[in-house]
Image (cartoon, grey):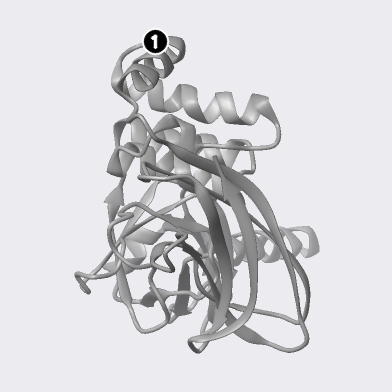
Amino acid sequence: MIIRIIFLLCLADISSKATFALTRISLQQALHHPGISLKLKGHSSSRQRAELLVKNGMNHEIELVVHAGQLLHTSHQDAQNLVVTKTQFFALKPGEQLQKPLWAMCIESHDRGPGPNDPFRPVGMASGPLLAMAQTIDKNQLYNNAAAQDALWCLSNSHPLSSIYHPDPKITRLLQEQVAVFHGISLDELLKKERLNQPKHNRVFHAIYRFALKQDQSVELRLYDPQGNQVAQLMPETCLAPGVHEIPVGYYRSYPEEGYYQLVLVTNNQVIERKLIRLR
């Protein structure tokens, strides 16, 4: 009799655990789930461009998975849409609310970088070369690298291969090869084609911009030509903590003349510092 009671208690315990087992759910599924509250907005980080706010309203624990390659679109026409570049998992207990940044990058270079006031919505997974690139970035842990962002813009906005630069030549080639697959030719053929089609005067630079902040500040990095005209925003407005920061920057455009260009670090339209670079 005692053995039978113990056996029944064990069955009840197993049944209880099975009932409240952790349930894995994707970001897309969570959007339409009646027991889950989900909001997405832009984020000030230059690499973690989205922020997730989610609440588990069910009576059991869930695990929310955000896959690399997930597309995030905003209703604000002047802000860039995003693609997730790192698969992340978030466990939430019943009633728990979570607010976390997501590793995501921009896919529309002609628009501004998104910010906290830009709402986003998951619209399904990317496909083809864009999905392959996002998964490559995730697999090789390049989600915090400027070269990966340039590679995505090569796919989404036809930026030249020469805009992709990483101090490790193997990483540069890896990303460039993904772009070559998109064009359906070998990397060497694509590089040769770009060289033949380049304008007569090209100004290309890649550098690590190093600076220090004494307090929390929202800063952006701009590039000015020799006549004092802003020709690029190398880093969108980003809130950074105190300390020393190293930002990889690169730019490729056709300019009418060589000369000294200015890298200008700005906060609230006030110049923090300027550095001159010679483009030949």
79 sits left or right of 12 in the view: left
Residue 279 in view of the camera: yes
Q: How many numbered marks appear? A: 1
Q: Which quadrant of the structure image shows residue 93?
A: bottom right
- Crowdedness near tag 1: few (<14), some (14–19) or many (≥20) residues, C-alpha within 10 Å: few
Tell me: 3 left or right of 200: right
Residue drawn at the location 41% of the way across and 43% of the way down: 152
Spot occupied by residue 188 in the image (x, y as percentages of width and height):
46, 11
Nearer to me, 123 or 212: 212
Question: Residue at coordinates 28% horizontally, 57% vertically from top-left?
Answer: 110
- Establish if 260 lies above or below 269: above
> Above or below — where is 193 with respect to 90?
above
Q: Nearer the viewer, residue 5 or 113?
A: 113
Work out whether residue 143 can be spotted: no
Q: In front here: 18 or 246? A: 246
SS of the residue under disc 1: helix
Give the percent coordinates (x, y) of residue 141. 64, 43
Q: Which residue is the site of mark 1?
A: 189
Give, as a three-letter code, the residue at label 1: Glu
Q: Quadrant of residue 238?
A: bottom right
Percent coordinates x, y for residue 217 in the rendering: 63, 86
Q: x, y percentage for residue 181?
A: 37, 20
Image point 47% across, 22% down: which residue?
A: 177
Residue 1 placement: quadrant: bottom right
From the viewer's perspective, tell me whether residue 127 is left or right of residue 212: left
Tell me the quarter of the image containing the C terminus.
top right
- Residue, x 55% and y 79% (percent of image)? 266
**Relative to 221, residue 271 above or below:** below
